[in-house]
Image (tube, rainbow, N blue to C red):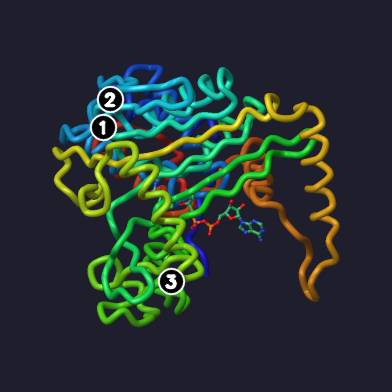
């Protein structure tokens, strides 16, 4: 059983998001940046972190916790690093600014770290990592969030589901591109199981005793997400908390406020981190691209497991979905459409396709 979907063109979806952000006072440029991050994420099929989140951002923009006219700025820097203060601008605006700063610094020095403080939820990490790959560089993006993930031995949330993405430029192939939570799944996937009224796998959640549960309705009040692969996801989440929350000077752990549930007048104080390696300064870029292409093709040609149709590269499913989205439109799940309908109602906007559920 799956959620119903509504087919919408990329341009119609962009138009609605642009109109909503314009009504909230964002400049044309900031609205365009935010729209591109959110709609690209939907086009990749990552519906938990695309335009579904817009309603939460609109609520905070209207409540004052996010500032439509804030400008992220470099607060301190060295040749190969910078700290960006987001001043509570929309998380996508600050994150794109910070990744652009990391790309510029990596061009000058070979590699760069940019930490971010005073940001908000940045959505899917993958968009920012791909900015570096488009510039012929290896990119990494990560962020912290309010704790909702237990760790081995704990019975309550200890860390956020701290997302991590990397992207590697290829030659004729699409960039390799992994974008994951450090929890077994992103929390939004549990909410989908709630909407479908289905049990979750017993590797996703622990209850208040720290024991596995399959009841999606316990989350988030009475259950925590599990890290992916136990201590491994936990260890990665700690690295992210350190680079995105501590080194950057952002809030860490419970210092981060919920962009969904907390008072919309509060700044959530999320942190983020962006790392870039300029490949061409280390090895000839053309040779690197050819070697990445060869590696991709070799892995794709690996003998398949019994019953498996194919072996995918990280990001390959997303590239396929995006190509389809651009030609046929995006099949938005019902929970995303409901959320966007809410945005339209809140802001007095209309879009014919919002009513056309198939
Ligand atoms: N901003 C935040 O606070 C926050 C927190 C958590 C997650 N997120 C976002 O949530 C999204 C979903 O996270 P998730 O952990 O549920 O993702 P997921 O478990 O669906 O994994 C997706 C990734 O795994 C790759 N993948 C999947 N199957 C594959 C296969 N068979 N072979 C090779 N690669 C494969 C995909 O290409 C993709 O890169 C991400 O975009 C993440 O950034 C954001």
Asked which quadrant contains residue 170, the reply is top right
Which quadrant of the figure has residue 123?
A: top left
Q: Residue 139 location in percent, x, y?
A: 57, 36
How packed is label 3: few (under 14 Cα within 10 Å), some, or many (20 or more)?
many
Q: Are marks 2 and 1 in contact (CB under 8 Å)?
A: yes
Q: Any mark on residue 279, and which?
A: none
Between label 2 and label 1, give the one nearer the viewer: 2
Residue drawn 51% across the image and 21% down it: 105
Q: Which mark is residue 23?
A: 2
Rendered residue at 80%/55% (across/down): 299
Q: Is residue 357 left or right of residue 348?
A: right
Disc nearer the start of the sequence (2/3): 2
118 vs 225: above or below: above
First-in-chain label (3 vs 1): 3
SS at badge 3: loop
Q: Is the CB of the residue bearing disc 1 within 8 angstroms of ligand 1?
A: no
Measured from the top left, where is residue 110 in percent x and y? Answer: 59, 25
Left/right of residue 177 with respect to residue 210 in the rendered view:
right
Residue underneath mark 3: 204
Q: Which residue is mark 1?
A: 348
Please say if 235 is above or below 61. below
Residue 8 in view here = no
**Residue contact between numbered discs 3 and 1, judged by CB atoms under 8 Å:** no
Residue occupying the point 43% across, 36% down: 352
SS class, disc 2: helix
Badge 1 element? loop
């Amino acid at each position: 059983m799956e959620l119903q979907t509504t087919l919408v063109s990329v341009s119609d979806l962009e138009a609605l998001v642009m109109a909503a952000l314009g009504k909230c006072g964002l400049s044309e440029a900031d609205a365009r940046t935010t729209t591109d991050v959110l709609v690209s994420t939907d086009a990749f099929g990552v519906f938990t972190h695309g335009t579904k989140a817009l309603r939460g951002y609109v609520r905070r923009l209207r409540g004052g916790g996010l500032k439509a006219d804030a400008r992220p700025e470099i607060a301190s820097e060295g040749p190969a690093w910078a700290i960006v203060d987001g001043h509570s601008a929309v998380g996508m605006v600050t994150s794109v600014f910070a990744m652009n700063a990391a790309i510029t610094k990596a061009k000058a020095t070979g590699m760069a770290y940019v930490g971010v403080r005073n940001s908000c939820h940045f959505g899917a990490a993958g968009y920012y990592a791909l900015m570096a790959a488009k510039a012929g560089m290896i990119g990494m993006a990560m962020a912290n969030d309010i704790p909702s993930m237990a760790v081995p031995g704990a019975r309550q949330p200890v860390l956020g589901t701290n997302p991590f993405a990397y992207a590697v430029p290829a030659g004729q192939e699409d960039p390799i591109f992994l974008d994951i939570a450090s929890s077994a799944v992103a929390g939004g996937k549990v909410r989908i199981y709630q909407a479908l009224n289905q049990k979750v796998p017993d590797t996703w959640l622990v209850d208040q005793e720290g024991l596995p549960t399959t009841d999606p309705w316990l989350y988030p009040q009475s259950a925590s997400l599990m890290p992916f692969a136990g201590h491994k996801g936990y260890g990665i989440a700690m690295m992210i908390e350190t680079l995105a929350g501590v080194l950057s000077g952002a809030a860490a752990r419970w210092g981060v406020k919920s962009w969904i549930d907390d008072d919309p007048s509060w700044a959530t104080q999320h942190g983020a981190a962006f790392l870039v390696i300029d490949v061409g300064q280390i090895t000839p870029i053309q040779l690197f691209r050819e070697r990445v292409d060869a590696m991709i093709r070799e892995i794709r040609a690996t003998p398949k497991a019994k019953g498996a149709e194919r072996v995918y590269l990280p990001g390959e499913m997303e590239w396929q979905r995006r190509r389809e989205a651009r030609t046929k439109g995006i099949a938005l799940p019902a929970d995303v459409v409901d959320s966007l309908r809410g945005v339209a109602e809140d802001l007095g906007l209309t879009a014919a396709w919002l009513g056309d559920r198939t």
